[in-house]
Amino acid sequence: MDRLAAMETFVRVVETGSFSEAARQMHVGQPAVSKTIAQLEQRLGIQLLLRSTRGLTPTEAGESYYERAKRTIEEADEAEHAARGAGASLSGRLRVSAAPAFASLHIIPHLGEFLGRHPGLDMEVVLDDERIDLIEEGIDIALRMGDLPDSALTVRKIGQSPRIVVAAPAYIARHGEPTHPAELGQHQSVVYAKGFGRDAWLFRQDGVEVSVTMRGRLRVSAAEGVRSAVLSGIGLAVASEWMFAPELADGRVKLLLTDWSLAPLDLWAAFPAGRGVSAKARAFVAFVEEKLSAA
């Protein structure tokens, strides 16, 4: 039995949840997949999968074997990629996690180009404002914003966006435009209640600092909700320039207090601890940096 081929079959079965789907993706018959898994379990002397009418789930030993088998396959792919040279196309699967609003505006529209450069590569983009467990969810790379808590993750800063105050023209027409940060307390604000959101902000101008607590009746737990509320004229918001890039360009929101500055928002590439960073992940990070620098 080809050990690496057996590992690849097992990984595909776990990720698809069925022998038939794994067989379809691998362009082989289902009996061949079932036979490979049975031979693998026999050689290891353990049960890797639990079979039921609801499908296939890995046992505890199967979960452990899956993680190591996937890592072995990635390392084998890395070795082949290095042997072929840096110009070789990438292959396999890349699983990426990112915040929905940021990814929808700045990542997903460019993925056609990235996939076009690497015809053998498949991608899965997990959109979630929560900071999920990368190892548990099988994530190769996560794009995370703001201050990162102490963790065992391997991280690298790959971008930075100014924080700004924005409002829709309709809101300004009804409530006026603030000319000083101290006036923000008199306005309705849309507060991003998760992630890098906060109520108090420190504004700076020529060595002067003004701390402002944003007050508003609306708190939203996702960035896309903040966007929608601001564009609807409900209130103004402190946000990253990335969050409102299209609307700033076409005038659907207005930049306020432009002679004051706020601490910028950092973008990080985060990788699961204890794993080497794959060529796929490195190429994707370089691609994101390329697109952000060109924006």
Image (tube, rainbow, N blue to C red):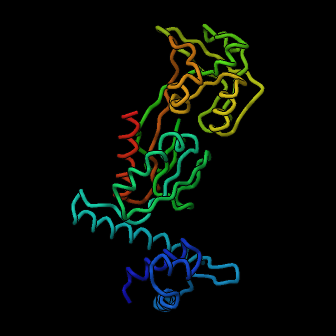
Residue plotted at (64% across, 16% down): 212
Q: How many marks?
A: 0
Q: 132 above or below 68?
A: above
Judged left or right of residue 230, residue 140 is left
Residue furthest to the right in view is 217
Residue 159 coordinates in the image, percent (x, y) = 42, 36
Quarter that holds the C terminus: top left
Task: Work out whether residue 118 or residue 270 is closer to the camera in this orientation and state it.
Answer: 118
Residue 44 coordinates in the image, percent (x, y) = 47, 87
Residue plotted at (65% across, 28% down): 231
Residue 160 coordinates in the image, percent (x, y) = 44, 32
Q: 91 above or below 266?
A: below
Task: Work out whether residue 16 or residue 270 is closer to the camera in this orientation and state it.
Answer: 16
Quarter that holds the N terminus: bottom left
Q: Please tell me in which quadrant of the rendered image residue 196 appears.
A: top right
Residue furthest to the front in view is 250
Q: 230 above or below 211?
A: below
Residue 104 coordinates in the image, percent (x, y) = 54, 43
Judged left or right of residue 11, residue 279 is left
